Structure formats: structure tokens, C-alpha cells
Amino acid sequence: MNEILELLKSRSSLRKYENKPISREDLDYILEGAMRAPTAGNMMMYSIMVIEDQEKKEILSHTCDNQPFIANAPTILIFVADFQKWHDYYRYNGVEEYCKKNDLEFNRPSEGSLFLALGDAIIAAQNAVIAAESVGVGSCYIGDIVEHYEEHKKLLNLPDYAFPAAMLCLGYYPEGLKLTPKPRFDKKYIVFNEEYKSLNSDEIKDMYSSLNNRFSSENKYKAENYAQMHYAFKTGSDFSEEMARSMREIIKIWNGNKL
Amino acid sequence: MNEILELLKSRSSLRKYENKPISREDLDYILEGAMRAPTAGNMMMYSIMVIEDQEKKEILSHTCDNQPFIANAPTILIFVADFQKWHDYYRYNGVEEYCKKNDLEFNRPSEGSLFLALGDAIIAAQNAVIAAESVGVGSCYIGDIVEHYEEHKKLLNLPDYAFPAAMLCLGYYPEGLKLTPKPRFDKKYIVFNEEYKSLNSDEIKDMYSSLNNRFSSENKYKAENYAQMHYAFKTGSDFSEEMARSMREIIKIWNGNKL
């Protein structure tokens, strides 16, 4: 197995960082790695915010589902899905008038642009993760950056057609720390040949069986099995509801309230 | 610069492939690399379809905006954003009844789950791109897989809470082929410190100036500058409209027509 496959195989999320800033050289490698990521039509529909201001990190540690370790990351990168620059480029070059003259509709960013920009931003983020890992910088995705859209929009001074798609906490590995990569579901439940394979109840039971030992009958959720517990603390939780609300607001902006 | 950074830097989309199947060993490396990708809450909200059937590849080459090279890729991977397995896991374990008993709402997959699953699928796809590159397999993303949702759903036998988030064409590099990575926008227009920087008209003009030489005054779009031309063949095109429609349908399913 080559060095790159080894890196992919051994990487884990890092939530505890050496107390030392990321060198500008390493940060440049990370950002340049991100900017070399594949991008739809070479349009680079994203922007990357480098956050190192302590106050801002503290705020993010609260708004992103109260995770104190966020404030301890020396550097945070926020990847925003960004169609604002293209929208402005079109506007400054008379595209609206061009459309009128040629009987075309001038569309504002749509759900399609949202999808492409989100993809661009996330692909770039994953390149950053790998570039970081290769220079000894660990990382952790924070999906919660999609919550509290209005607050984050203000905090990051975002225009209408840009929203946070991914956030990474970055920092060097603490000396001596060895992480064990988490187990994944069995390949036969993730990879399918030629078409999707719907799983029956026995297969679902088998797929999720490894999670059973996390269940404790004395849990604060009054759950009777791990699925119920998982639903209570994750999918049915307040932060999930907030994420759905936030994402719904973002979609509304991009689709011009068409839905 | 280490080997991994070199790989990120030199990678380009490959649209012409050596006429030889991908070895099972290399395919396994690629799939295992994908499955080691970071995933929200270790939930792996995606499935990967391995497509090698020629007829299916031909169909995809038509439905994905008529790009014949797609049918020549020895292997196609489709990453679907997938909440169906979790939804079924909850259902088979009485989560709906549990919710009733405990005065909780049983939510179907929401815009929040859609966002997380889309992210999971795309992050895994990018790991596959990098794993592939490391064993001499080139790749090309096909964003058009998000178009014609209903047709692709049928073709891939997808359940309701799974939709194509990324498609990769994969194949070995043809002997002797050397690709030159495409230029990217200047870093100062992509990377911002601490907060978003809205660009004024001069900055937008400068950012996009490298595209000007692609403009030809004799173009079939009757465009007067490159921005207008770009809008006509890309953002304002039929396939963009189809992508928006398709994505809108997907969102409707995941939000239970709430919007």
C-alpha cells in the first residue's frame, strides 16, 4: 500500500491540538492543496475563511452546538459555498440586459448552483484535510456550522449567495498522541454493484449490530434500544432541528422563494 | 513538498482512458480509501454504486448532458447521499412508537440530513479521487448526475431517501499522456482572513480577467463579452435549468413538501 493510501487509512478526526500556531508555510500548503481541488467547470464556487481570532473561535465554539474544543484549535477554516462572485461578474457585465435582448431568462442562483457550489466547497475542504494530514496537522469537520445561518452570516460578513458548507478545526497533533481510526460499516452495506440494493430488516439489523454495545438500558432518553437512543440524541435532537431550519432558510434564498 | 502535496497539485480531470479494466486490487484500494473518509457522527450517510455494465454507462453518457467519453470509462462510481438505511434502522427499532410515547416528533429525513448526507457522499468521493490517483487511475467528476433525478432513480433502483450526489469516471491514464493542471483564480479572491471580503467591480474585473481571452466576438450566443457567453452556455443553459428542477424535486422529498 502506498503512502497516500496509508494516510487515508490511518486518518482520524483530531479534537485535541498541540498548543502552537500552524506555521504559515504549512497553512499555505493546506490552502494551496484546497485550491487545487476539482471544481465544476473550473468555476471555484467557494471561498475559504481563515479564522484565528480568539474571540471569533470562542463564538463559533458556542454557536456550533457548544463544543469547547473548537476554541482551542489554532486555526479554523470555513469553506463557504459561494456563487456571489459569479453573480456579480454577470451583473457587472450586463448579463441581465443581454438576457432581455436575447429573450433569455436571467436566473438568480438556483438550487442547481447551490448543489454545485456546495460540492465545490466540500471537495476543497477534503483536499485541505489531506494536505493538512500530510504535514502533521490534524483536523475535525464541524457540520454544525450550517446551524444558526443568520448569526454566522453576520459573524462572517457573508453576502446572500454564500453560506458555510464546511468548517475544519486544524492543529498539530499533540506529541505522543496515537488515534485509532473508528470502525466503519461493512463494505457490503455501503458498496453495491450496478444498482442500489435495498436492505431488508435482517440486513439492517446485521449492518447496525456493532452499535448495540453502546446501548445502556439506564439512559436519560428512556430508550429501549440503541436506535431509539441514537434518534433521541442525534436525528431528533434540537441541533438537528436547527440545522434543518437553517438549511431551509439557505435554500429559500437560493431559489428565490420559488418552492 | 511531500508526495501527497505533489499529487494534489498535479491532479487534473481525466476524460480519456487506457482501454483496460481497473484491476480488482486497485478498485478495492479506491473503495476502501473512500470508506475511510470522514463522515458526520460516523454515520456513513452514503452508498457507492460501482457501474461497469456497458449499457448502463451508455445511458449515463446520454442522461449526463450527452458526454460520450463517459461510456468509455472502464468504471463509474456513483456516490449517493443516503439516509434510507438510517431511516429504516429507526423504523425497524420502533423509533416512531418511542417518539409517540415520549412526546417527541418523529421527523422524516430533513434538509439537515440532506446536507449531512450530501457532505458525507462528496467527502467520500474526493477520497476516492485521491486514492485512485495514487494508483495511477485518473478521474473526472460528472456534476450532471444530479439532473434527470427521476430517470436516475429508476436506473439505479434508488429508494426515496437516496439521491446521486457525485459521479466519478475512472480509468488508467493512457500511456504517455501528460495533463497540465488548469489555472485557478488568484488566491486573494478565494482565501479571506477572518471574514468574507465582498469584491468591488474592479476586483471582480481583475479576478475574472484571465477568462477574457476565451471570448470571441463571433460567437453563436450573440454575446458581447465572456461573462455573457459564459452565462449563455453554462448558468442560463438548459442543463442548468434541469439541474435546478431536479435538485428542487430531491429537496421536496427530503423536506416532506414542507417548503
Image (spheres, coloured by chain):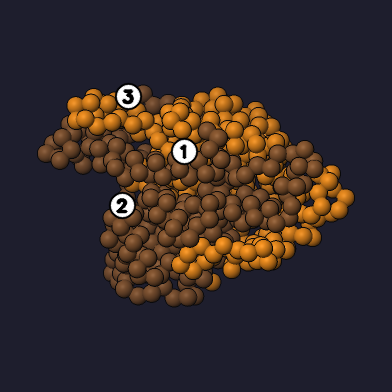
Chain colours: A orange, B brown
Q: Which mark is residue B65?
A: 2
Task: Single out the mark in the foreground, 3 or 2.
Answer: 2
Residue labelled with disc 1: A81
Residue labelled with disc 3: B201
Mark-to-mark CA distance, 3 and 2:
33 Å
Q: Would residue A44 appear left or right of A137 to someone viewing this image? A: left
Q: Chain of mark 2?
A: B
Few, some or many C-alpha atoms within 10 Å of disc 3 (few <14, some 14-19, many ≥20)? some
Q: Marks 3 and 2: same chain?
A: yes
Choose top left, top right, bottom left or bottom right for residue A72.
top right
Q: Quadrant of the N terminus of chain A?
A: bottom right
**Helix, strand, or loop for circle 1?**
strand
Amino acid carrying label 3: it is Ser
Report the residue that reaches farthest toward the left: B218
Query: Above or below — where is A223 with respect to B191?
Result: below
Task: Single out the mark in the foreground, 2 or 1.
Answer: 2
Amino acid carrying label 2: it is Asp
Residue A221 point in image, percent of width and height: 81, 44
Residue at 35% x, 59% y: name it.
Answer: B60
Residue A18 point in image, percent of width and height: 68, 46
Residue at 30% x, 26% y: name it.
Answer: A91
Query: Above or below — where is A228 with respect to B177?
Result: above
Residue at 58% x, 60% y: name it.
Answer: B36
Few, some or many C-alpha atoms within 10 Å of disc 2 (few <14, some 14-19, many ≥20)? some
Mark-to-mark CA distance, 3 and 1:
21 Å
> B220 or A198, which lies in front?
A198
Residue B12 point in image, percent of width and height: 36, 56
Residue A50 point in image, percent of width and height: 53, 36
Residue at 50% x, 40% y: name it.
Answer: B252
Q: Would residue B134 appear left or right of A234 to someone viewing this image? A: left
Q: Is residue B55 visible?
A: yes
Amino acid carrying label 1: it is Ala
